[in-house]
Image (cartoon, rainbow, N blue to C red):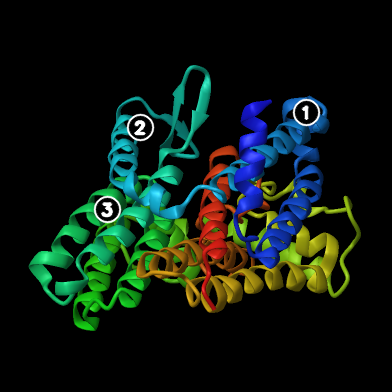
Amino acid sequence: MSVVQSLKRKVTDQAPADKYVVWVILALSAVGVVAVYSAITYMAEVRIGTEPVHFLTRHLVRVGIALGAMGIVSVIDYRTLARYSRIALVGALLLLAATKIAGLFSEGADRWLQIAGFGFQPSELARVALVLYVAVLLVQKQEYVKSFSRTVLPILFWVGLTVGLIGLDDLSTASVVLLTVLLMCFVGRVSIVQILGLGLLGAAMAFGVIANSPDRAARVESYLGVNLFASTSTEQVMDAGGERYQSRQARMALAMGGLTGVGPGKSVQRDFLPAPYNDFIFAIIAEEYGLLGALCLLFGFCVLLFRGYLRIARNAPDPLGLILATGLTSLIVVYGFVHASVSCGLLPVTGLPMPFVSYGGTSLLANGIMAGILLNISRHAQP
């Protein structure tokens, strides 16, 4: 009881967190619960032979854990968390390395690590730790932030190690993380030339990974509609049942939804889309609630972008809060828009979940932690 009272006193003694961010995250989580229950029905009943309520209960527990983590982290000073960011990043890198040795295969990539019966994705934890530590490095090196050897090289070491380990199995996550770090470097006053150089280096590495992976190459080629790499064939690229299948089914879901949708729980494309409860949850929402429902969902991420950039980051009490709020906001919002763009056919299929909406334990927890840090920065805001 004393622990509860102590926590309650700690919360009441602090300034209130950004209420708009809180309400948007709660709304996204509620939409996700309804959408996941609808999207997972076919898989549960037909493919697995169990009740959908089983998966709904699991998702509710995970959402509760994520929101609980958000609440706890929101009362911990973000500067305290930043002090342990290097330890957290080293631990995450060790877990990523362990995944290469003893990882579980999931859709062609050993991204999962199982410990004591619990499976999780170390890449989700690594991206949070990396954003924290890069913000710390940028603040520590402000006196010589334009120096390549003293600033960019140390950042490049940690970013290259983390993004490289993630990108071996999950190139889309690595790309978003790298984009976020580049934006943080821009806010942290790193030279534009050096930022462009890092971006070009990342693009070259991504091209090399794609060129040496027939599956990734076919995915990019099917999106572009041309055969570019020697490791793939024209028949493989143009196969309607191959890499193009998922994107086509997602666009069909959007078309069937029209303006107002077919109605809650009445999705047809959930029976055809692979992982509709995760990778293509936006397509299911657009089908059931139409263009209006999809736009409302995207509006929620626009609110997070506005509050994160123009309120929390802008009013942060110190450079650490500014850079950290920029990075965390970018990481959450870019994930959401990339997920929606994939469903609309604007980007190749990536497999990125929609924050707070898609089904998934580690992703929900990581997003909850990031949102909690963002809310804690808002508690210290100085207009």
Mark 1 Cα-neighbour bin, 10 Å: few <14, some 14–19, many ≥20: few
Q: Position of residue 249 (x, y in %)?
A: 68, 59
Mark 2 Cα-neighbour bin, 10 Å: few <14, some 14–19, many ≥20: many
Contact, mark 1 vs mark 3 (Cβ under 8 Å): no
Mark found first going from the N terminus, 1 or 3: 1
Question: Which sits in the foreground, 137 or 159?
Answer: 137
* Vertical comparison of 260 with 23: above or below: below
Q: Residue at x 25, y 75 (%)?
A: 195
Q: Which residue is mark 3?
A: 212
Displayed quadrant of residue 342:
bottom right
Q: Residue at x 66, y 73 (%)?
A: 303
Q: Does residue 167 show up?
A: yes
Q: How far separated are the C-alphas under marks 3 and 2?
A: 21 Å
Q: Residue at x 58, y 68 (%)?
A: 337
Q: Which residue in the rendered view is the most extreme toward the top? A: 116
* Vertical comparison of 187 with 52: above or below: below
> Residue 74 vs residue 98: left or right?
right
Question: Which quarter of the rendering shows the C terminus?
Answer: bottom right
Q: Residue at x 73, y 27 (%)?
A: 48
Question: Residue 89: which disc?
Answer: none
Q: Position of residue 256 (x, y in %)?
A: 82, 66
Mark 3 Cα-neighbour bin, 10 Å: few <14, some 14–19, many ≥20: few
Which label lies toward us, 3 or 2?
2
Query: Looking at the picture, which amino acid does disc 1 mark?
Result: His
Q: Which residue is mark 1?
A: 54
Query: What element does badge 1 sit on?
Result: helix
Mark found first going from the N terminus, 1 or 2: 1
Q: Which residue is mark 2?
A: 99
Displayed quadrant of residue 250:
bottom right
Query: Looking at the picture, which amino acid does disc 3 mark?
Result: Asn
Question: Which quarter of the rendering shows the N terminus?
Answer: top right
Question: Which sits in the foreground, 247 or 229?
Answer: 247
